[in-house]
Image (cartoon, rainbow, N blue to C red):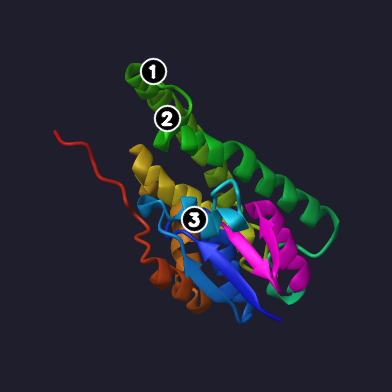
Amino acid sequence: MSLKLYFAPGACSFVPHSMLELSGAAFEPVSVKLHKGEQRSADYLALNPRGQVPVLVDDGEVVTQIVSILLHLDAKFPQAGILPASGLARTRALSTLAWMNNTVHPTFTHVFMPQKFADDEGTQKVIGAFAANSYRGLLGEIEALAARASPWLTGEKPGALDAYALTLLRWGGYAGIDPTTFPATWDLAQRFAALPAVVRAVERERLQLNVYQPAAA
């Protein structure tokens, strides 16, 4: 068995990256430097023509899209607790995972890359500002989930939702949002990042949890 994960430091690929570390599985991590355009290289586009991370290669089979990768890893390593095993707990976790991926994540994309949605600079600024305000509200929804965590978002074991919550909260800093203003999520993120297995992913990606910079007076 061979596993290879293509990830970009600080991107959503941190979620499967940390899950692989938590699973204890042997895998080869491959860093893709988005700022250098490595996702647009011919070799990478041969793996994923969309030029996105993450990409998982499992014994030569390519899996793309974060939800699909997480479901694949969850089936492969059920002992890792990536998602609840069954029943309503699993259904609710999948619902939250889908919402994080199809609503919260794209909202941040409008903040970070408004040029994808308009070619006029003035319009881009409007899109970014509007999305940042919306993103703050979505982080508030995650905060409500984190406030009920016991001790993790899906119960006794840390899993994919905790990794995604950390990622989304961290991105808030780039949207001008202080992550410490969401205390339950900030506490969850710090506890998750401090897990020995997750530390390996954090150090490999050289992640700084709080990237928020207050606006100059």
Residue designated by label 1: 123
Task: State how many labels appear.
Answer: 3
* Above or below for 200 versus 87: below
- Give the Cα distance between marks 3 and 1: 30 Å
In the displayed structure, does residue 140 sit left or right of residue 83?
Answer: left
Disc number at residue 114? 2
Which residue is drawn at the image coordinates 61% and 58% (left, top)? 47
Around disc 1, counting alpha carbons within 10 Å, would you say few (fewer than 14), some (14 to 19), or many (20 or more)? some
Q: Amino acid under label 3?
A: Leu
Question: Where in the figure is residue 169, as x and y percent of width and height?
Answer: 45, 49
Q: Amino acid under label 1?
A: Thr
Question: Where in the figure is residue 11, as x and y percent of width and height?
Answer: 47, 54
Can residue 91 be spotted in the picture? yes
Pair 3/1: label in front: 1
CB within 8 Å, label 3 to label 1:
no
Q: Is residue 66 magenta?
A: yes
Around disc 2, counting alpha carbons within 10 Å, would you say few (fewer than 14), some (14 to 19), or many (20 or more)? many
The magenta span reads: 54-76
CB within 8 Å, label 2 to label 1:
yes
Which residue is drawn at the image coordinates 47% and 32% (left, top)? 110
Q: Amino acid under label 2?
A: Pro
* Above or below for 172 versus 30: above
- Assign a secondary structure to mark 3: helix
| Quadrant showing the N terminus | bottom right
- Give the Cα distance between marks 2 and 1: 9 Å
